[in-house]
């Protein structure tokens, strides 16, 4: 399950638990979670006021020696877990949901989504609420070039600022 207040105005959906999240039983506590928290702070979003969950509820991995290496969930796994995030959204009733990455976007929309095309404007979900799509923080961790990494992190923070401003508009 995710975590956060039941009256959260913003619900973030990630991909799946990573190794550290699986061990801790909490979403976004590993390296991607630390980057996510930093970006939220920079964008002026209090994580404690948001609900954070994952599209796929189990940690899919490949064992390499003593390490468990993340493996991308398949469409069937995303679809099988969709019921869980739908139940969380039905309970929280957030006016704004954010898909962090393609797996979350597929879980929320039921179809494959290209992040670069869907990133700038919200989609309307079946319940009438808004869905904003942006990159997953783990994407930012995998960019090898420092200048591109910095530019993509700044763009991610700008996405979050736009999402914060829209959440404030919807609340008023």
Image (cartoon, rainbow, N blue to C red):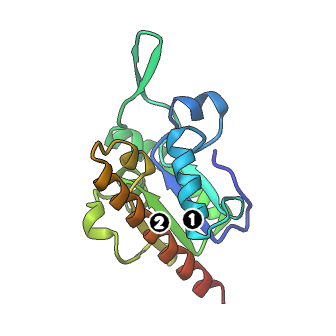
The image quarter containing residue 125 is bottom left
Residue 50 rendering spot, x and y as whole percentages: 65, 62
Q: Is residue 4 left or right of residue 100?
A: right
- Count neighbours of disc 1 (C-alpha within 10 A) and say few if under 14, some if 14 to 19, many if 20 or more: some
Mark 1, residue position: 42
- Count neighbours of disc 2 (C-alpha within 10 A) and say few if under 14, some if 14 to 19, many if 20 or more: many
Residue 95 rendering spot, x and y as whole percentages: 58, 75
Callout 1 secondary element: helix
Tell me what residue is drawn at x 55 percent, y 69 percent: 43
Measured along the vertical axis of the image, is residue 19 above or below residue 121? above
Residue 51 rendering spot, x and y as whole percentages: 64, 58
Quadrant position of the N terminus in the picture? top right
Q: Which mark is residue 157?
A: 2
Of the image marks 1 and 2, the number of the one nearer the N terminus: 1
Measured along the vertical axis of the image, is residue 155 above or below residue 71? below
Camera-nearest residue between 164 and 63: 164
The image quarter containing residue 94 is bottom right
Mark 1 in CB contact with mark 2 (< 8 angstroms): yes
- Residue furthest to the bottom in view is 172
């Amino acid at each position: 399950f995710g975590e956060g207040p039941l009256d959260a105005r913003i619900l973030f959906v990630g991909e799946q638990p990573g190794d550290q999240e699986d061990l801790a039983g909490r979403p976004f506590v590993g390296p991607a979670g630390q980057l996510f928290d930093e970006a939220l702070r920079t964008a002026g979003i209090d994580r404690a006021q948001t609900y954070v969950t994952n599209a796929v509820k189990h940690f899919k991995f490949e064992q390499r020696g003593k390490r468990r290496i993340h493996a991308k969930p398949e469409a069937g796994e995303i679809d099988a877990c969709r019921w869980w995030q739908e139940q969380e959204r039905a309970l929280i009733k957030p006016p704004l949901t954010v898909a962090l990455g393609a797996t979350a976007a597929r879980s929320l929309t039921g179809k494959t989504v290209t992040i670069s095309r869907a990133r700038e404007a919200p989609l309307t979900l079946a319940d009438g609420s808004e869905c904003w799509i942006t990159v997953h923080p783990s994407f930012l961790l995998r960019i090898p070039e420092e200048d591109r990494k910095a530019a993509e992190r700044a763009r991610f923070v700008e996405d979050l600022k736009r999402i914060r401003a829209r959440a404030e508009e919807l609340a008023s």
